[in-house]
Image: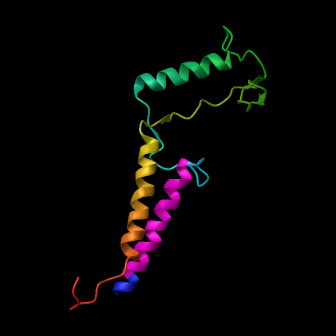
């Protein structure tokens, strides 16, 4: 039974180390849950204000052009092309430190789980 637990700890530690390293080296396994957070009200207002400026609406509310930065825009029901608002997520402070800690914790778990056990009754 102890071998099964040690094996599971090695697998869990290796997975955590790889996931933490992946988030530090370009998010090739996707963005981890600690990478972004919900914005405060002021941050959300700023994000939406920048989006409104980029869309460039005219006085009558119609879009100023058929595209935003050269990308095709989805059409709304009334024929106007309006881009969807941006996702309301902002980078979390210390996200790289969290990823480094996850990597270090995973490596530590692997080391602890793979070190040889002492035999009972032997001198240290």
Quarter where residue 66 is shown: top right
| Quadrant in which the C terminus is drawn | bottom left
Provide residue 59's location: percent of width, then percent of height. 66, 7
Residue 94 on the magenta segment:
no
Picture quadrant of residue 56? top right
Point 53% across, 24% down: residue: 47
Relative to 13, say whether 116 is above or below.
below
Q: Is residue 82 left or right of residue 109?
A: right
User: What is the magenta segment's predominant secondary structure?
Assistant: helix
16 and 51: which is toward the camera: 16
- Magenta region: 5-24
Horizontally, is 16 left or right of 51 in the view? left
118 in relation to 68, above or below: below
Q: Position of residue 99 (x, y in %)?
A: 46, 49
Q: Position of residue 111 (x, y in %)?
A: 40, 70
The quarter of the rendered structure image containing the N terminus is bottom left
Give the camera-side residue of 91 and 106.
106
The residue sitting at the bottom extreme is 121
How many numbered marks are there? 0
Q: Is residue 42 above or below residue 36?
A: above
Residue at the (45%, 25%) spot, across then down:
43
Residue 23: x %, y % from top left: 53, 50
Q: How is the image coloured?
A: rainbow
- The quarter holding residue 77 reads top right
Q: At x 60% / y 47%, what residue is drawn?
A: 26
Q: Residue at x 43, y 67 (%)?
A: 13
Give the residue furthest to the front.
123
In this view, 88 is above or below 95: above
**Which residue extends farthest top?**
59
């Amino acid at each position: 039974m102890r071998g099964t637990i040690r094996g599971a700890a090695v697998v869990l530690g290796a997975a955590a180390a790889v996931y933490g390293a992946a988030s530090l080296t370009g998010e090739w396994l996707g963005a981890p849950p600690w990478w972004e957070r919900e914005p405060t009200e002021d941050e959300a207002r700023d994000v939406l204000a920048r989006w409104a400026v980029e869309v460039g609406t005219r006085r009558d509310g119609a879009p100023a052009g058929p595209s935003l930065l050269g990308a095709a825009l989805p059409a709304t029901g009334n024929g106007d092309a309006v881009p969807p608002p941006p996702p309301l997520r902002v980078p979390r402070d210390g996200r790289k430190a969290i990823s480094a800690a996850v990597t270090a914790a995973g490596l530590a778990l692997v080391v602890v789980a793979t070190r040889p056990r002492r035999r009972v009754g032997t001198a240290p």
